[in-house]
Image: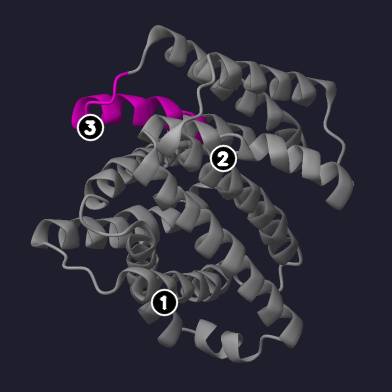
Amino acid sequence: MNKSSHLKPILQAILVTFLWSTSFILIKKGLLEIPAITYAGLRYGLAWLFFLPFILFTKHRSEITKLSRIQWKKLILLGLIFYTFTQGAQFLGLYYLPSVTVSLMLNFTPILVAVLGIFLLNEKPSILQWMGAALFLIGIFTYFFPVVLVGNRALGLAIMIFGVLANAGSAIIGRDVNRSKNIHPIIITFVSMGIGAVILLVVGLITNGLPTISGRNWIYLFWLAGINTAFAFTLWNHTLRSLTAMESSIINGTMLIQIAILAWVFLGETITLQESTGMILAAMGAVLVQIKKKNLDL
């Protein structure tokens, strides 16, 4: 692949991470009016509808009818863990915590997946990966020091710890579903997203009722669903055909910085020098954890 053809997927991946970073800002604004769980259900429910034509009018429609009982169980579990638990926790976390804090917590996922991989996937991290994990933890400690857990901050961090655990669990389940290569990725996304979105919507409507949503927040919702979810997920998967896991992880790691800048500009969330240092150390550690995965993909 020449330099010009390789540059295109890099630019596409950067666009995707920017769109995903803006999601944190749009969600924070929407949460002023829409309850968190309902908001999450609406986002992924609408995104599921955007995927619907690509299922109904293609061969994927018949492929869904041929899924085995075991495959259905795995997809249902993936939908529950990745969308209901992980995304629900992210929306709740954004309600109680600054956007940058939520983003930083989510970056803990690769570290946890590496540890879980030892026991569940028989994959032992390299020394460099362990160094990355240590660097990440130093970054986390730097960011939060001194640790003061009171009120909504403590609740928000507890929710995000659960969300990170769920996100790591969904990564393990997702890998188990995808590595067999007997279910198309679009079907995996479509079925699991639909299941997760329905549960989120039902729980949200039962606990909070039907919210009154302004025209502005409907625009936010349709943008989040159509552009930041359906389009961005599809484009990201397309870039993975050309980019290595390491390249993708580095680009994805820039979200932490992007979110910090966007939150400062649009939400007035300030970042101290100490917090900036912690974020940079954590991002570097998260990248180091991904190096072995790159070597495996090569």
Q: Residues within 10 Å of mark 3 (few under 14, many from 20)?
A: some
Residues at marks 2 and 3, CA–CA distance in whole angstroms? 33 Å
Q: Is residue 20 above or below residue 144?
A: below
Determine which residue is flagged by label 3: 267
Q: Is residue 272 visible?
A: yes
In this image, 218 relative to 294: left or right? left
Q: Residue furthest front?
A: 151
Helix, strand or loop at label 1? It is helix
Residue range in magenta is 252-270
Q: Nearer the viewer, residue 76 or 147?
A: 147
Mark 2 vs mark 1: in front: 1
> Residue visible at 60% across and 48% down?
162
Verify whether residue 93 appears in magenta. Answer: no
Residue 60's mark? Answer: none
Can you tell which mark lies on residue 202?
1
Depth check: give the residue in front, 132 or 272: 272
Q: Quadrant of residue 210?
A: bottom left
Between discs 2 and 1, the one toward the N terminus: 1
Q: Which residue is mark 2?
A: 243
Mark 2–mark 1 Cα distance, whole angstroms, equals 38 Å
Helix, strand or loop at mark 3: helix
Mark 2 or 3, nearer chain start: 2
Label 2: how many residues lie within 10 Å, few (<14), some (14-19) or many (20+)? some
Q: Position of residue 64 (x, y in %)?
A: 58, 85
Residue name at image x 75 percent, y 61 percent:
176
Q: Position of residue 137 (x, y in %)?
A: 65, 22
Crowd around label 1: few <14 · some 14–19 · many ≥20 (10 Å): some
The answer to whether 206 appears left or right of 187 in the picture is left
Distance from label 3 to label 1 (Cα)?
30 Å
Q: Amino acid at mark 1?
A: Val
Q: Nearer the viewer, mark 2 or mark 3?
A: 3
Q: Earlier in the sequence, mark 3 or mark 1?
A: 1
